[in-house]
Image (cartoon, rainbow, N blue to C red):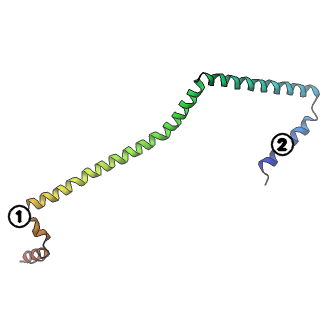
Amino acid sequence: MKTEHETAKEIVSLLDDSTAILDREVLDRLYAARMKAVGNLAAQKQAASANGADGLGHVLRLFGNYMHQHRLLMPTVMIASAALVAFIVTQQMVQPSIEQGDAFLLGAELPPEAFLDKGFDTWIARTSQR
């Protein structure tokens, strides 16, 4: 399998071979078009540097980077918000069960110490069989 470098060398070689058979007039037109393209490229670089000098190019580039970051930031914020809401809802659902347990102990006819007594379960089992 050929590497990119070897493939590029073959393309250059084929182009060199095919330019050898071209007329002088065609070669002159190709050279003129190349010089025009290089001149246009240089003019574009100068215009870009002039835009960069007044700061507009930099501001637009920074704004573009912000928009890219913004696209990544919003889903992250939304997922974190959803996780926070789920956590709060779960905490709100757990709280009443703890309070109901306290209310049960305080409202029971027996003192809370009775529920901690090891023989209480046995006494309940014997009295419920009667």
* Amino acid type shown at disc 2: Ile
Amino acid on which the number 1 mark rests in the picture: Glu
Residue at the (73%, 22%) spot, across then down = 43
Callout 1: 10 Å neighbours few (<14), some, many (20+)?
A: few
Q: Nearer the viewer, residue 80 or 29?
A: 80
What is the distance, in whole Å, between disc 2 and disc 1 at their CAs? 97 Å
Q: Horizontal and vertical percent for residue 10?
A: 85, 45
Q: With 13 as the anchor, is 102 left or right in this view?
A: left
Please state, as top left, top right, bottom left or bottom right, where the C terminus lies in the image: bottom left
1 to the left or right of 107: right
Q: Circle 1 is placed at which residue position?
A: 109
Q: Which residue is mark 2?
A: 11
Task: Please state which of residues 46 and 129 is positioned toward the viewer in this rendering.
Answer: 46
Badge nearest the viewer, 2 or 1: 1
- Say which quarter of the image contains residue 35: top right
Q: Vertical placement of 5 versus 123: above or below?
A: above
Q: Which mark is residue 70?
A: none
- Residue 36: x and y, percent? 80, 23
In the visual, does 96 lie left or right of 123? right
Query: Which quadrant would residue 39 be assigned to in this image?
Result: top right
Could you tell me which residue is drawn at 8 percent across and 59 percent down?
107
The structure residue drawn at horizontal position 37% and vertical position 44%, both measured from the top left corner, is 81
Q: Position of residue 64 (x, y in %)?
A: 55, 32
Neighbour class for label 2 at 10 Å: few (<14), some, many (≥20)? few
Residue 25, position as x, y percentages in the image: 92, 25
